[in-house]
Amino acid sequence: MIKLVASDIDGTLLVEGSDKINEEIFDVILKLKDQGTLFAAASGRQYASIRRLFAPIENEMIFVSENGSNVVCRGYEMSSTVLNRQDAEELIRFIRTQPGCYLTASTRGPMYIEDDDADFLKLLTEGYHNDMRLVQDVLKEEIEIIKISIYKSTGVQDIAEGVIAQWKDRFHVTIAGEPWIDFMDFDADKGKALQTIQQTLRISREETMVFGDNNNDLGMIASAEESYAVANAQPKVLEAAKHIADENVNDGVLKVLKTLLDSKGGIQMYKYDDACLKAFLEKQLQLFDEKVAETLEEADEFLDDVMAVTVNTLEEVRDYFEEAGMDTSDMSGDELEEASEVFHLPDGRYLIVEG
């Protein structure tokens, strides 16, 4: 039984930097809680921002904020990390020298910024709904900093490799969406935060389900037996996750949670196993001119509609075609295996799909 669900926010549950959430998820989270499954929102956002997003149910869930730097449940701080002051000061001075980059310094309370660019302020206030303090010099503020971030509106991909290489020995550095690079204490990570929740509540890895889209979600994915990447996720996340959910813009997380709710705490088992579904998604263009499925759910539905079958050997493939009225007597084993209707699975089985 799944006892804990944790989901990333931006890029997974929502569009990056948005405050628009499908309110149906509130009712689903409450019903899951009634069935013994807790929900945690795990984000690079600050605690106040996530709490506002889930305001109708804020006392019924857990908040992992600032990429794992802070974990709060019903106002109780389960864990928190603080950056070394000297290292933080050096990093802040470095960020100030980077063209097109804006600095944010997060605390357990407000976020501190030094730039009053209108678009930047609008994103932070209207998009993320952050608590903020605009100051002339962050270094003059007597604050405990739990996370420092670089924001670059055009994206951080052109600077990320160099920046990470320069600071990775002093901070836990992660790309947190296209415009963000986050710097935390080495003990701050979504995966470690999730493990803290698991240990505190005595919930096992096997009883945990997670959702993510970006590299800062990989720690969570490694800490849960049932891991989902949304279909719009980064390649590393798609590769690491056990399952693929629909895209964030199509409420992929909500769809899976509703299925979890319908199964009364169990995991929905697709009619076809993951090996079949992933092989079909990857190789479907060998049979069709265009893709007929984008997610595991869509693949499962399509294969069920066309009554696809799995067999264990090439001889069984031959038998299937013979029973369907096809003469395969002149076909070699290689020719059978190369037939467009036949999908060779990694475990040696064969999926047969008739379009």
Image (cartoon, rainbow, N blue to C red):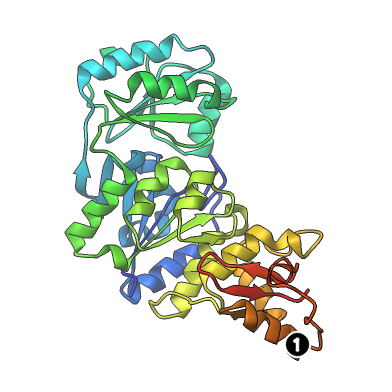
From what the image shows, is residue 94 above or below residue 126? above
Residue 19, horizontal then vertical, whole percent: 53, 46
**Left/right of residue 233 with respect to residue 86 in the rendered view:** right
- The residue tagged 1 is 322
> Is residue 125 in view?
yes
From what the image shows, is residue 189 above or below residue 223? above
Residue 173, horizontal then vertical, whole percent: 36, 30
**Left/right of residue 200 with respect to residue 297 in the rendered view:** left
The N terminus lies in quadrant: bottom left
> Is residue 10 in view?
no
Determine whether the residue tagged by mark 1 lies in a helix, strand or loop: helix
Residue 14, horizontal then vertical, whole percent: 54, 49
From what the image shows, is residue 321 above or below residue 198? below
Q: Kindly identify the amino acid type of the residue bearing the numbered disc 1.
A: Glu
Residue 273, horizontal then vertical, whole percent: 52, 73
Which residue is rendered at x = 53% and y = 64% of the image?
346
Which residue is rendered at x = 58% and y = 54% of the image?
231
